[in-house]
Image: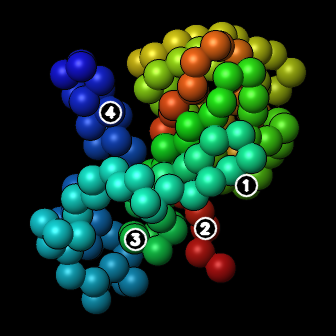
Amino acid sequence: MKLLNYSVIAFALIVFPTCSQAQNMDNDSIDKKYTIQNCVNHFNGSSVVKTKVGYQYWFADKDFLDGRTLKMSVVKPHEATHAPHKHPEDEFFFVLEGTAEFYLDGQTVVSGPYTSFYCPSNVEHGIKNVGDTELKYLVIKKYEKK
């Protein structure tokens, strides 16, 4: 499973800067002190957010940096978290385990682990579990500040 760990780390580093880089990126984060304690988030089962079809775990929520988030979604076999939709933010999905059907602007593709899907802003998209085991994927997204 070392491949998985390195793939996830490499993918996240492309989208997210290091903590020291992030401190200099926006005025809100200048006041925040980043330490090894708040820059490391080990999965904690007691902090999952239940959904109708599984659960979500936020490794970095909207308040950690400047709206950039990292979330893991886990979906039961043959289910979807929600129907295809669109929103102003673009986002990435990165499949960790299972079989996902990715929908983008009227087309679909089915893929397994170590696959990323990009969702451009304001384009209808969705992801669902089309396999017989749990689907686990990362969602990387930046929410605009309000």
Q: Residue at x 50, y 56 (%)?
A: 48
Work out how far the residue at label 1 is from the one at label 4, CA to CA, in angstroms.
Answer: 25 Å
Q: In the rendered structure, are the residues bearing label 2 and label 4 in contact, judged by CB atoms less than 8 Å apart?
A: no
Please name which of the two marks, 1 or 3, marks the residue nearer to the observer.
3
As shown in the figure, which amino acid type bears the numbered disc 2? Glu
Picture layout, residue 41 above or below residue 71: below
Res. 129 image quadrant: top right
Work out how far the residue at label 3 is from the one at label 4, CA to CA, in angstroms.
Answer: 19 Å
Q: Which residue is mark 3?
A: 64
Q: Residue at x 49, y 44 (%)?
A: 72
Q: Which residue is mark 4?
A: 8
As shown in the figure, which amino acid type bears the numbered disc 4? Val
Considering the image in quadrants, where does the C terminus appear? bottom right
The number of numbered discs placed on residues in the rendered structure image is 4
Say which label, 2 or 4, has the lower sequence index.
Answer: 4
Work out how far the residue at label 2 is from the one at label 1, CA to CA, in angstroms.
Answer: 9 Å
Q: In the rendered structure, are the residues bearing label 2 and label 1 in contact, judged by CB atoms less than 8 Å apart?
A: yes
Horizontal side of residue 23 vs 62, given as left or right: left
Q: Which residue is mark 1?
A: 88
Please name which of the two marks, 1 or 4, marks the residue nearer to the observer.
4
As helix, strand or loop, the secondary structure at mark 4 comes to helix
Q: In the rendered structure, are the residues bearing label 1 and label 4 in contact, judged by CB atoms less than 8 Å apart?
A: no
Q: Residue at x 47, y 22 (%)?
A: 97
Picture layout, residue 139 above or below residue 26: above
Question: Residue 1 placed where, x, y %?
Answer: 24, 19
Q: Residue 144: which disc? A: 2
